[in-house]
Amino acid sequence: MGFIPPPSPSASAEQIREMYIAHQTRIRVGLILTVVSCGLAFPWAVAIAVQMQRIEGRWSPMALSQLIAGVALPLLYIMPVMAWASAAFRPDERPAELTRFANDLGWFPFVGVGSPAFIQSIAIAIVTLRDIRPNPVFKRWVAYFNIWCVLLFFAGALIYAFKSGPLAWNGVVAFWIPVVVFVAWIFVMTYVLLAAINDQEDELNATPAGIVEFESDLQHQVNRLSSELESIRQLMSRQPAPAQGS
């Protein structure tokens, strides 16, 4: 994209300006591809939410949380794309300080704001660990993998305090490790998502033996919902009766 490796946050304004002039075409092409690819994140997040809902049932707070975060993530990445596009549009016609400002404005949210990915990974992990059926939607290792990803994503939030070293936005800990982990997360979750969709199709086209297993899973969800409903009823019964009006 013209940003590999990323420019140093300690680089001078003139150095940043020269980078945008030298790699102007590559940066523009990369930004166009980024905008197009961001659109793929929306159906991806929806598909994950649908599979999570198979675990949670009708009331699906974790699935909805993952869906909202998954929709917010590509929208968040549009902001740095616009900042970099502004810097690359006419770097030879504006002061170097303005180009560096636009460059900074792009890197801070791109590397430093990982909360949507945090929420997605945590929600997936919680739901996966709660799925105790014999044939779970996602295997338990998917939950542990997502927890591991959250821990490694977190380093990106430290870039606001560093202009050099491993915790700067071009550092090993804050940039390279999270980027590698994020790419791995996308591929792993896509793989397990496709597997879950195939399993769901097999259930819908099940043989008599498969129907029995599907009914068992469905009964498990009904029992869990009944238990939750009973707990709600007990809590409501403990509430004091409303005072009678005068």
Image: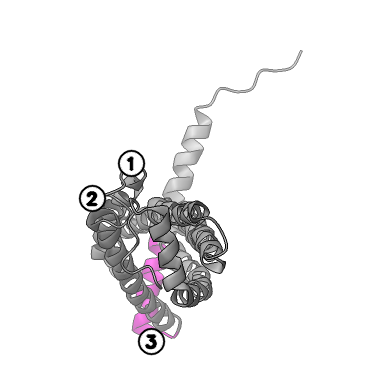
Q: Is residue 138 visible?
A: no
Disc 2 packing (10 Å; few <14; some 14–19; many ≥20):
some
Q: Is residue 211 visible?
A: yes
Residue 50, numbered circle: none
Tag 2 residue = 165
Q: Quadrant of the C terminus?
A: top right
Q: Please name which of the two marks, 1 or 3, marks the residue nearer to the observer.
A: 1
- Residue carrying label 1: 161
Q: Nearer the viewer, mark 3 or mark 2?
A: 2
Tag 3 secondary structure: loop
x%, y% of residue 147? 27, 55
Q: Quadrant of residue 20?
A: bottom left
Tell me the amino acid under the disc marked 2: Gly
Which of these two is toward me, 154 or 236?
Answer: 154
**241 on left or right of 12:** right
**Which of these two is toward me, 133 or 123?**
123
Mark number displayed over residue 207 = 3
**Which badge, 3 or 2, comes first in the chain's sequence?**
2
Foreground: 184 or 161?
161
Quadrant in which the N terminus is drawn: bottom left
- What range of the chain is rendered magenta? 205-220
Tags 3 and 2 in contact by the CB under 8 Å rule?
Answer: no
